[in-house]
Image: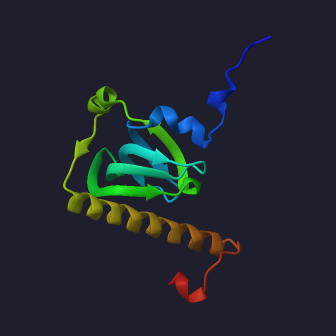
C-alpha cells in the first residue's frame, strides 16, 4: 500500500505555514496578480501580504503598481505559489512604465469588445438569440 502524504492535497490554513515570510504570487478571481511577502493567514486562507505589487501583463510586457500592505480574502484566491527569483529573471518579459501598460491593457480590452460585438452580430443574423437590446447592434 502506498503511503501518501495527504497534507499536500488539501488547501487549508495550516497548509500555508511553509509559505510564511516568502515571496508569493497570488492570482485573484478577478484576474489580478499580486506579488508580495506572506506575513499572516487564518483558517479561511485570508492573507496578509507585505510589500505587495499588482503586476499587469500585456503580451510580453508588464507593469507594476505598488500596493503596500494588502489583505486578501481567501475566497478570492485562485492560485498561490512561491516566486522563484532565479526563474523570474530568465523570463523574456519587458518591464514598461505603468501608464504605458494601462494604455495597452485598455486597447486590448477595446479590441476584445469590438470582436465580441461582431461575433454577436453574426450570431444574431444567423438566428441565434443573444442577450442585448436591438439598438446595441448598431
Q: Is residue 57 visible?
A: yes
Q: Position of residue 126 (x, y in %)?
A: 67, 71
Which residue occupies the extreme bottom position in the image?
Answer: 135
Look at 55% across and 89% down and name the residue there. Answer: 135
Look at 27% across and 40% down and name the residue there. Answer: 93
Q: Position of residue 86 (x, y in %)?
A: 30, 26
Picture quarter containing residue 112?
Answer: bottom left
Q: Position of residue 117 (x, y in %)?
A: 51, 72
Q: Is residue 58 visible?
A: no
Look at 47% across and 49% down and name the residue there. Answer: 27
Picture quarter containing residue 102?
Answer: bottom left
Quadrant, the N terminus: top right
Picture quarter containing residue 8?
Answer: top right
Side (left or right) of 52 relative to 81: left
Is 86 rendered above or below residue 74? above
Which residue occupies the extreme left position in the image?
Answer: 97
Look at 52% across and 57% down and name the residue there. Answer: 73
Q: Nearer the viewer, residue 115 or 72?
A: 72
Q: Nearer the viewer, residue 18 or 92?
A: 18
Q: Position of residue 6 (x, y in %)?
A: 69, 26
Total numbered labels: 0
Amino acid at each position: 500500500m502506498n503511503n501518501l502524504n495527504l497534507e499536500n492535497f488539501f488547501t487549508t490554513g495550516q497548509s500555508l505555514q511553509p509559505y510564511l515570510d516568502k515571496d508569493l504570487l497570488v492570482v485573484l478571481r478577478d484576474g489580478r496578480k499580486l506579488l508580495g511577502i506572506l506575513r499572516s493567514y487564518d483558517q479561511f486562507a485570508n492573507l496578509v501580504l507585505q510589500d505587495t505589487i499588482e503586476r499587469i501583463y500585456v503580451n510580453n510586457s508588464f507593469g507594476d503598481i505598488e500596493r503596500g500592505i494588502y489583505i486578501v480574502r481567501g475566497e478570492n484566491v485562485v492560485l498561490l505559489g512561491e516566486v522563484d527569483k532565479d526563474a523570474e529573471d530568465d523570463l523574456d518579459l519587458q518591464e514598461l512604465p505603468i501608464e504605458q501598460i494601462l494604455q495597452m491593457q485598455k486597447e486590448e480590452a477595446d479590441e476584445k469588445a469590438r470582436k465580441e460585438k461582431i461575433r454577436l452580430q453574426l450570431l444574431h443574423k444567423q438566428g441565434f438569440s443573444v442577450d442585448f437590446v436591438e439598438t446595441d447592434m448598431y
